[in-house]
Structure formats: C-alpha cells, structure tokens
C-alpha cells in the first residue's frame, strides 16, 4: 500500500502540483524526487516525533514563530524547498492536507516517470547498497522504475514481502513454513484416509433422518452458471450477489463539513498482554471515519471494549490502545481526552475539535447505564453530535444506550449507517434473499441453543445445512447415537428432535457428522486421541469432525454457489482438533475461487479463517458473530430500523 491512503481532494492536488512545478524548476527530476522523499520523511517523522505531531494538530503557528519552529523541528533534515512549502501550507492553515498532498505528488511522479510503487518489508532495515540492488532487480522484473518504500516487520525473518500495487508477494520464511505445514495437513495421512473413506462411504448421503434430494431453484430463477476464477467481492454500487441497498441513508448522504459527527464504532477487539491481536474491527471502521474527516467533518468516536464492571475506569478495558492503533491507520493524531466518556475533559475535547480531526472517547461500558440503555446517559452523549452514524455491526443486535436510546435522543438530526454496516447487511441480506444456488449453510460452535433459531429459519431456504462443533452432539443424541462424554444440552433435546422432524417434513438436507476426532480429556494434549465412527464410546468426547465428515462436507461445499458459515467444526485453537475447521475453510475458499460467494459470520469462525491465512480468499468476513447470527435467524435490528430512510 502507499505510504498514505488518503484520497487527494482538488485542493491537495493543487498544492501538490505547485510543489511539483517548484521542484522541477529548481532542479528537474532530481529535485522532484528529492521533494517527494522529503515529504515522505515529514510523514514518517510526524509519526515518531511528538513536537511535529503537536504542530500538525495545531495546524497553524503564529507568523512570528513559523519559520523558526519549522527549522527547529526538522533541524536540517529537509530541503529549503520543502521547508518553504510547509511554511506556505502553515500560513494558509492547510497542514491537515499533508497526507493527501503526499499522495497526489506520489501519483504525479509515477505518471511523469512511468514508475510503479512498491512496499518492501524486511525483518531488519535494508542498507542503501542492498536497497539499490533490490530496485535494480525490480526494475528488470517490472519493466518500469519502482518507487520503493522500505519497512521493517519482524515476521519477515528469512525473507521479504513485496506489495506491488494490488499484488502481494510474500517470501518470508514463516510464510513458507506455514504453507508447508498446510500442505502436510492437507495431504497427510488423515486427508488421504478421508479420500479413501469418501469413496467407500458415499459422500453424498446425509444423515438417515434427512436423506432428501436437493430442492430445485425457485421457478423463474435460472440455475447458476459455472464460472472460473475468484468471485469479486460485493463493492459499493455493484450488483454482484445482490446490491448494496439497505433502505437506510449512509454517511455519504450527510453534509458533514464543520459538523460534529458522532460515530458509534465497534472497537471491541481482542487484547493480550497490551497488544491488539486482531484489528479487523478497527480497520473496517476506517472508511467511514475517513469519509467524515476528509470532507471537513469532526469525527467523535464512541465504543465499548470488553466487559468491565460498569463502576468506573478499569485500565484493562481502556480504549487508549485503540486510539493509538487508529492513529497509525489514519496517519494522523487521534485525541483521547480522559478516562470517562462523559466528564468535563471529554466534553471540552469534543468542543475543541476542529474540522478533519478525530476524537475517541473512553469505554462506554465504564457506565452501567450503557448496558441498561438508559436515556439519561444517551442524552449526555447526544450533546456531542450534530449527526449520528451507526457503524458498529457487532453490537447492532443489542439495545445498549449508544445503539438505541442515543439515536432516539438525536431525533431531528441526521441519523445514518456507516459503510461497514451497509456492507454487512448487504452481504447477509443478499445471501438470504436471493442466494446463488446451491445455497449451503455451515453451522458449528459449542451450543446448539445459540444456533437453533438459525437452523430452523434456514432449513426452508438452504439446499444443504452442515452441522459441526459440539452443538452436533445434541442432535446426534436426539437420534439415539452414542456420543460418549461429548457435550450435550439435555434441556434442548426436544428442540433438536423438533428440528430433525422439520428437516424431514421439508425434505431438506441436514448433514450431521459421520465420524469424530475424540479425546479422553478436554485439553490441548495429554489425553488419548482416537477417531470413532457414529458411536463414540464412554470416556471419549468429540472435539472435531472426523476425516469422513471432512471429505463429505468439502464435497458439498465445492459445488456451492453461496456459502454462509457461522461457528467452527471443532476446537480449532488446538492442533489435534483443528483439521475439520481448516478443511471447511479451505473448501469455502476454493468454492469462492471458482466463482461462489462465501460469507463468514464473525466470532470464532472469523478467528479461524484468520488463523489459517484464508480470510483474504473469502468474499466477506463479518465483524459481528452474534449480530450476523441474528440476521441468519431472520431478525431485524431496532438500532438500524430507527435510523433515517433513503
């Protein structure tokens, strides 16, 4: 990716053109390249130097301090040409446009000199001589002179990673080892055994209580054509897999210039030892935030994190770590004013925010009122915004104050959805409304009680429903199968029998595991591990679907036109019990490559495809496990329904 991802506006392009012309007049191509390099240094320097970050945040220095401050900050790092240019920007109050100006100048240089931009990632900094050699090799390979941005990344041990335009070339040792491990997993003894069992067992037979032929596509709907190549993701304004229409206004329809835009985001990310281990939810919120600040709005962000007691500040659940991470993603400061989202410091920071700036307030759930949905708490938050944006899909199914009471309190002001919710609803609603056939649903996870509503809602719609995970054992027990010490929800046995009867009446294909990878203890290691067919003996518990089931489910998935998946097939976090989930993920990815649409419903399923390195090969990975599951049950969200219609 480029150093800056900002989309340059007209004003930024004008400034970039001015700098380009000045540099070209001063010394031709060499001076232009020097100016670009210096501006890249400005951007990098701003991320690491508190004085310059403060300078950017202030946007304008008094005239009598301007030149001296610039020289003091950069201390001879930059050419006189760039320092003079920054003085002009400062004088006109346009330093907030600097990322866009760098992007514009980058593009002009590439167009002028016919070059391509390359990001180079190595484990240790590259020496100038080595970098020159890499540039030479890249020029020969690409046929154009590259602009190379060099970054360090510890995971690149033993190799390099190149981002050339949209193409990623990952040659790190860790990646090669991961690919070798995956190949061994795929072609190892278990998979080979599965292929033999697949032939012997007859892979197209579902469980005895639901052996039904696939139902035809609805009358008037042609059968899906087979295609080759990966399915294109559903982008804004496209028709692939359904349009993006949700019936609700989006942030793009709001005039945000000079306005305080209160954005409910979902920054409830996993944090271990002070490190964010999965930043998907933060990354997915960036397009909405950028839309606001790049159009001159002031983004006021609110979110929750974890499950604090609700009695005040708890350091373990502070959103400060998210503010710092978002600042890196945006390439600009993110203000984080206090330890309370409603105290005087928070209110002052919101009032002081300028156009194009971002403020993230502290964890909403430090107040019990957030979970209780209290209108009084919502009224305090409502005072922060001239407009409200809901972009927290992972919380849409909840009636928290910031999700329901807050937009109610802001009646009369714009209340819209963000781009993430637009995308999430578009994918899931399109899959349920008019799926490509065959439509295959995969449901797993620990508790059948969590998925019963989804199964019963989807059985009439889907061509096949594949069940795995611990939830499968309640169904198997209802069929009279021996499940040993596997987890069974005894209080849901009647529900399981009712669902099995429904599948039979509908002549629907409901698949349950034919074999199981079992252990004598629920632990990563230490127990006796064995594979059993339909009857699991006492003393053993099922912790993953077995090789016959893996092959059977993969065969169903490889023919799918639409796949919706929520819940892993086993305890995928432990190597001995991850193969079933991995095989389903790989089959879904391969179906996507052949032209299908695959939707992974957040939560543990999203964590699994991330762990297997397959997330990028699927059409959509949701940010909301519970929310996506409720959509699969056919439920609507009050938090979305009360927002402005188109």
Image (spheres, helix red, strand yellow):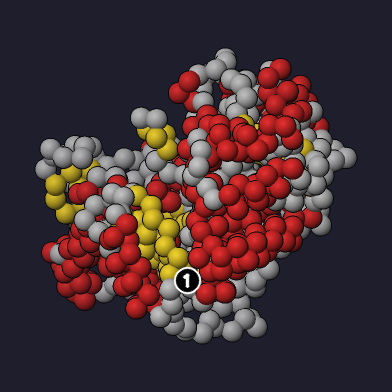
Mark 1 packing: few (<14 Cα in 10 Å), some, or many (20+)? many
The answer to which of 276 and 428 lies nearer the viewer is 276
Quick one: quadrant of the C terminus? bottom right
Q: Is residue 570 above or below residue 66?
A: below
Q: Is residue 412 above or below residue 570?
A: above
Q: Secondary structure at mark 1?
A: strand
Residue 636 visible in image: no
In the rendered structure, the answer to whether residue 62 lies left or right of residue 473 reads right
Q: Is residue 536 above or below residue 354?
A: below
Residue at 81 percent across and 38 percent down: it is: 386
Q: Quadrant of residue 464?
A: bottom left
Residue 22 visible in image: yes
Image spot of residue 400 (x, y percent): 65, 32
Q: Quadrant of residue 103?
A: bottom right
Image spot of residue 140 (x, y percent): 34, 78
Q: Which residue is mark 1?
A: 116
Residue at 54 percent across and 50 percent down: it is: 79
Image spot of residue 612 (x, y percent): 32, 56
Image spot of residue 158 (x, y percent): 21, 56
Q: Is residue 70 above or below residue 583?
A: above
Residue at 43 percent across and 77 percent down: it is: 144
Q: How many marks?
A: 1
The answer to which of 26 and 620 lies nearer the viewer is 26
């Amino acid at each position: 990716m480029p150093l800056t991802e900002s989309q340059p506006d007209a004003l930024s392009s004008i400034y970039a053109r001015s700098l380009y012309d000045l540099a070209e007049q001063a010394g031709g191509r060499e001076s232009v390249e020097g100016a670009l390099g210096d501006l890249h240094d400005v951007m990098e320097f701003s991320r690491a130097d508190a004085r310059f970050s403060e300078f950017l945040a202030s946007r304008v220095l008094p005239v009598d301090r301007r030149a001296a401050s610039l020289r003091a900050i950069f201390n001879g790092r930059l050419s006189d040409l760039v320092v003079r240019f920054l003085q002009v920007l400062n004088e006109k109050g346009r330093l907030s446009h600097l990322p866009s100006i760098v992007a514009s100048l980058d593009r002009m240089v590439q167009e002028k000199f016919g070059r391509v931009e390359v990001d180079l990632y190595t484990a240790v900094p590259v020496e100038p001589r080595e970098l020159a050699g890499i540039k030479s090799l890249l020029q020969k390979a690409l046929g154009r002179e590259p602009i190379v941005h060099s970054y360090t990344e510890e995971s690149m041990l033993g190799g390099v990673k190149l981002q050339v335009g949209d193409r990623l070339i990952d040659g790190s040792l860790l990646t090669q080892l991961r690919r070798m491990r995956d190949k061994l997993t795929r072609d190892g003894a278990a998979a080979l055994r599965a292929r033999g069992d697949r032939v012997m067992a007859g892979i197209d037979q579902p469980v005895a209580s639901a052996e039904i032929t696939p139902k035809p596509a609805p009358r008037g709907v042609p059968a899906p054509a087979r295609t080759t190549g990966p399915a294109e993701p559903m982008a804004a304004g496209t028709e692939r897999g359904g349009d993006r229409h949700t019936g609700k206004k989006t942030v793009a329809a709001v005039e945000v210039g000079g306005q305080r835009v209160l954005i409910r985001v979902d920054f409830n990310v996993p944090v271990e030892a002070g490190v964010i281990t999965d930043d998907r939810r933060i990354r997915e919120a960036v397009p909405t935030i950028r839309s606001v600040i790049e159009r001159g709005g002031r983004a006021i962000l609110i979110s929750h994190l974890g499950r604090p007691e609700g009695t005040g500040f708890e350091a373990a659940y502070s959103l400060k770590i998210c503010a710092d991470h978002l600042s890196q993603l945006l390439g600009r400061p993110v203000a984080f004013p206090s330890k309370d989202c409603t105290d005087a410091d928070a209110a002052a920071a919101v009032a002081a925010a300028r156009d194009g700036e971002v403020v993230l307030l502290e964890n909403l759930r430090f107040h019990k009122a957030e979970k209780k949905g209290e209108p009084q708490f919502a009224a305090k938050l409502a005072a922060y915004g001239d407009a409200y944006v809901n972009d927290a899909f992972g919380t849409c199914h909840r009636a928290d104050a910031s999700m329901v009471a807050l937009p109610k309190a802001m009646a009369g002001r714009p209340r819209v959805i963000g781009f993430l919710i637009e995308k999430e609803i578009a994918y899931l609603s399109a899959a349920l409304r008019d799926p490509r056939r065959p439509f295959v649903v995969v449901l797993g996870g620990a508790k059948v009680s969590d998925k019963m509503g989804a199964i019963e809602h989807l059985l009439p719609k889907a061509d096949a429903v594949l069940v795995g995970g611990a939830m499968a054992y309640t169904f198997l027990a209802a069929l009279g199968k021996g499940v040993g010490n596997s987890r069974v929800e005894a209080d849901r046995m009647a529900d399981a029998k009712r669902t099995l009867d429904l599948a039979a009446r509908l002549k629907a294909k409901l698949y349950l595991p034919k074999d199981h990878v079992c252990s004598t203890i629920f632990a990563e290691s230490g127990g006796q591990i064995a594979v059993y067919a339909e009857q699991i003996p006492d003393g053993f518990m099922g912790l993953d679907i077995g090789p016959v089931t893996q092959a059977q489910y993969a065969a169903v998935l490889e023919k799918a036109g639409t796949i919706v998946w929520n819940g892993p097939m086993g305890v995928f976090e432990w190597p001995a019990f991850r193969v079933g989930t991995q095989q389903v993920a790989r089959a879904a990815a391969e179906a996507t490559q052949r032209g299908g649409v695959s939707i992974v419903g957040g939560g543990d399923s999203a964590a699994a495809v991330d762990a297997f390195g397959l997330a990028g090969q699927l059409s959509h990975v949701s940010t909301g496990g519970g929310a996506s599951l409720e959509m699969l049950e056919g439920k609507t969200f009050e938090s979305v329904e009360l927002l402005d219609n188109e």
